[in-house]
Amino acid sequence: MLRVALMSKWHVHAEGYAELLRSFSDAEITCVWDEEPERGREWAKSLNVDFEEDMDKILAREDVDGILVCSPTSMHAEIMKKAAKAGKHIFTEKAMALTKKECEEITAEVKKAGVKFGISHPARTTSSNLYVKSVIDAGLIGKVTLLRIRNGHDGALNNWLPEYWYDESKAGGGAMMDLGCHPMYLASWILGKPVRISSMFSYVTNRTVEDNSVCTIEFENNAVAIVETSLVTYKTPSMVEVYGTEGTIVICDNDIRMTSKKMDEEFKGWVTPAKLPEALPHSLRQWVDGVLYNKPILFDTEAGTKLTELLEAAYIAHKEKREVSFN
């Protein structure tokens, strides 16, 4: 049985993670900590578990094997480094931290302590995105030249996100830092090492952080990714488009179409795959399995660091109005 402490209800997905964790037969929530004690007490009461106001005390508890971090992103590094030093396994909502340097510090403590680490990268578990990666890896569309990924909703436009979501000191940014994480880590997973990035962010609802944003990224293989995200678009379909020298894949929500020069004559034109790869387990399930049964955790400190590297550079590019190169 994996005994887990919930570290903050700040993130909008915190309740969902708690519900999912409670659905596992081999995991249980033993206690709650929150940087806002009153919120934490109410959450702990609703879950019928202990609330602990002192972070050090909760990390010292014998009935805590691991932590689930849904705190403000600005607190991630402090919480996770302390947890690793206390010998606690770590699962975190994205982003891993605000800077690559913080991610490297977390990674060092995780490795030193020998604890398990997992981060939420749900878009990498879906059948459709696994299909995209398998087609590219099989060479069916030749050399990838352009990748476009769009992810958006109207949370800022219709005010269904909490107002603290737009506090840069806690969140680290706006649309790109939150919803943009998904197209960012997908682009890195599909295309590899980034070379340079530029950004165009805008402020439709006039908040202190951006609510509409686009990044363009060049990778070592000369492919270019266009990463789009928004908190001010109505019923935005999830879009993935891959253009290659010998084929194209277009995904709009669950509608998948592909064409390739390498397909047999009877399949010339656009086709829809008859079968997709099986979806992977949820990121949280992977973490529990990794801790309890030593199974692979695909979304680890390396994956988290790669994402933060892209996000950090994207915000530098936006604020300094320049193209940013990667080392």
Image (cartoon, rainbow, N blue to C red):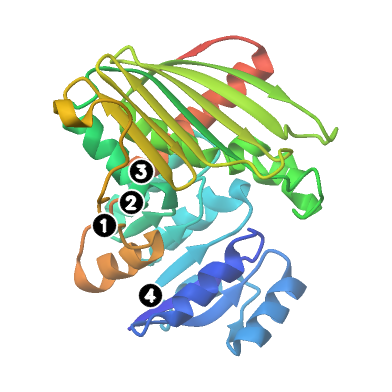
Q: In which quarter of the image is the C terminus?
A: top left
Q: Which mark is residue 65?
A: 4
Q: Nearer the viewer, residue 182 or 259?
A: 259
Q: Nearer the viewer, residue 260 or 64?
A: 260
* Image location of residue 288, percent across then percent down: 33, 70
Marks 4 and 3, the one that precedes in the sequence: 4
Q: Identify the residue under disc 3.
A: 129
Q: Label 1 near label 4: C-beta < 8 Å? A: no
Q: Label 2 near label 1: C-beta < 8 Å? A: yes
Q: What element carries label 2?
A: helix
Q: Label 3 near label 4: C-beta < 8 Å? A: no
Q: Residue at x 28, y 43 (%)?
A: 273
Q: Which of 261 and 81 is in front in this view?
A: 261
Q: Which residue is drawn at 60% across and 70% down?
A: 15
Q: Mark 4 or mark 3: which is in front?
A: 3
Q: In this view, does 157 lie to the left or right of 241?
A: right
Q: Label 3 near label 2: C-beta < 8 Å? A: yes
